[in-house]
Amino acid sequence: MTARNSSSAGTGPFDIGAGWPAGSSGRRTALSGVIGDPDDEAPKPPKNTKPRRPARTTPMSNRGWDGPGGGKVGYLDAPTMWRATTVQACGLWPFSAGSGAPMSGVPLGQHLFTGATVCGDPISWFTRAKYISNPSLFMLGMPGLGKSTLINRMAVGLAATGVVPLVLGDLKPDYADTVRALGGQVIQIGRGVGGINVLDPGAMGIAAERIGGQAGQSLEAETHGRVLNMVAALLTIVRGRALDDHEQAVLSACLRHLRENTPKGKAPLLPDLLRVLQEGPDRVRAVTLDRGQEGRYRDAVDPLHRSLLGILDGTLGDTFGSATSTRIDPAAPAVCIDISRIGESDTQLTAAAMLAAWSDGLGTVAASHALADAGLAPRRWYFTILDELWRPLRAASGIVDRIDALTRLNRSLGLGDAKITHTLKDAEALGSDSDRAKARGFVERAGIVACAGLPQAEMKDLGRVIGLSKREIDLVSSWSSPPGWASVGSNEEPPGRGRFLIKVGGRPGIPIRVSITDTERHLHDTNLRWVQNGYAEKQAAARQAAFEAEAERGDLVTPSGFGAPARDDQGWGR
């Protein structure tokens, strides 16, 4: 029931609670504020609202709306790619989708399809990620597509972790400038440049004296065997066939006699070995079964005598007949033995220099591990590089056996290796069926196989060895095509340069694109002979100036101050 206040001058509504006694809560009552007004019950006009827009019934595609008032985008811009760590982009972590690219090891490049960073190297994938069971890499590809550039990047990245790159026979050279930039040691071998004394025990002899005891004697016996094998390899190169069994026994007796009668700190030479054969001490005569007859002794040693004269007075004498010009420094952060001064036609000297470099380098590795086992030096890991594999394979059969042994024993030697050649057909040019079978085994036992551009027929042959899908064969084959004819006069590169397919076992291959930095481009230029006059000298002067500037700032370790880098307890650099 509503009522109006007649005594009020106005005609507005009245408060029903007016005049009632106040309650305990205050001046207001339970009816205070309750207003009655007949006008409140009258209907109110609706608000002036616009009619709703009918829902669109036309379909929408991935490029926009169809129909009137719509429109499709003719060209879709590629979305901008951003790269950040999980700390910077923590709101997006964990990612809803991943590329599956490995992230352990040296940063190599970007995935060709996803753009994700791909990292890897034989040592990291063997020791840390456990992706492979053998720390070795075999690289195949046509010339000029960046094979040695990728291995050069691995060497630089591994050197930063404390691994020592060893280039035991740089034939071009491709790695000498990089080793110098790392503060390493570059040793030149060739006529009039430098030589190697194959009778010098080197780092192994020094380590044996330092260790002493039973372990030192064992290392000394291993040193004797290494020197004996090296001299036998030189004689095999000169003769063109292997030594007889009694000739190896005579050599062993002569070397033991020399070691026992040479003052400490001095290494015997090949002329000293020849002198022992001429003198014929009792220890050597006993091996020949001369029975006190001079004629029987001469008949037994004369073929060996003639072969040694062939070394000293022939093509190998200048390089191997004198003392070692420069010994390998066991504390160097990187080592390169440069044999690029030897001509390509001089196959005998190339083979001998390669064998001597590998013998000296692996002897240094063995000495380093022996000292580490005795607690006298930190543990060091090594990364050996054998580029242009086809040249040493064809030089002498002894190289095939040496590389074959390396691929089987590199885990126990504590080193990873990278072998680079052009095609599998390089192995077919070897002289014997056994050598060809051994060379094919290099690919089968490799933990990682990396392929640059190769013809399709070569990829099919490779697919029968490591297993390749048709898509992988077609992809790598497309990289071997030259650039188009319209690119004459421009700087367009071959389509396959810097592109590689990385295969590990039966896993799908990882296609990557490698982009090199300016520093890598200046340090690793394999086309210096194809530049204008004076350009090579300018490039060399610029590199030298850059090295000196970095050395002054303290960013570069100069060759005069190289030493063992700091490492943690597991041998990695800090």
Image (cartoon, rainbow, N blue to C red):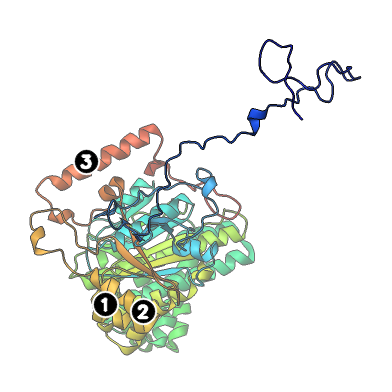
The residue mark sitting in front, 2 or 1, is: 2
Q: Estimate the spatial distance between the alpha carbons at disc 3 and disc 2, rounded to whole Å.
A: 48 Å
* Label 1 environment density (alpha carbons within 10 Å; few <14, some 14–19, many ≥20): some
The residue mark sitting in front, 3 or 2, is: 2
Residue at (41%, 57%) from the top-left corner? 116
Towards the viewer: 47 or 97? 47
State the image coordinates of residue 120 (x, y, percent, origin top left).
Answer: 44, 61
State the image coordinates of residue 464 (x, y, percent, origin top left).
Answer: 35, 84
Disc nearer the start of the sequence (2/1): 1
Q: Estimate the spatial distance between the alpha carbons at disc 2 and disc 1, rounded to whole Å.
A: 32 Å
Contact between labelled residues 3 and 1, with CB atoms less than 8 Å apart: no
Q: Quadrant of the N terminus?
A: top right
Tell me which amino acid carries mark 1.
Arg
Q: Is residue 354 left or right of residue 363?
A: left
Location of residue 393 (image quadrant): bottom left
Note whether 561 is above or below 459 in the view shown: above
Tell me which amino acid carries mark 3.
Ala
Location of residue 392 (image quadrant): bottom left
Towards the viewer: 308 or 296? 308
User: Residue 469 shows which numbered tag?
Assistant: 2
The residue singled out by tag 3 in the image is 541
State the image coordinates of residue 143 (x, y, percent, origin top left).
Answer: 22, 66
Disc nearer the start of the sequence (1/3): 1
User: Residue 394 shows which numbered tag?
Assistant: 1
Residue at (63%, 63%) from the top-left corner? 213
User: Residue 33 shows which numbered tag?
Assistant: none
Q: Secondary structure at mark 1?
A: helix
Tell me which amino acid carries mark 2.
Ser
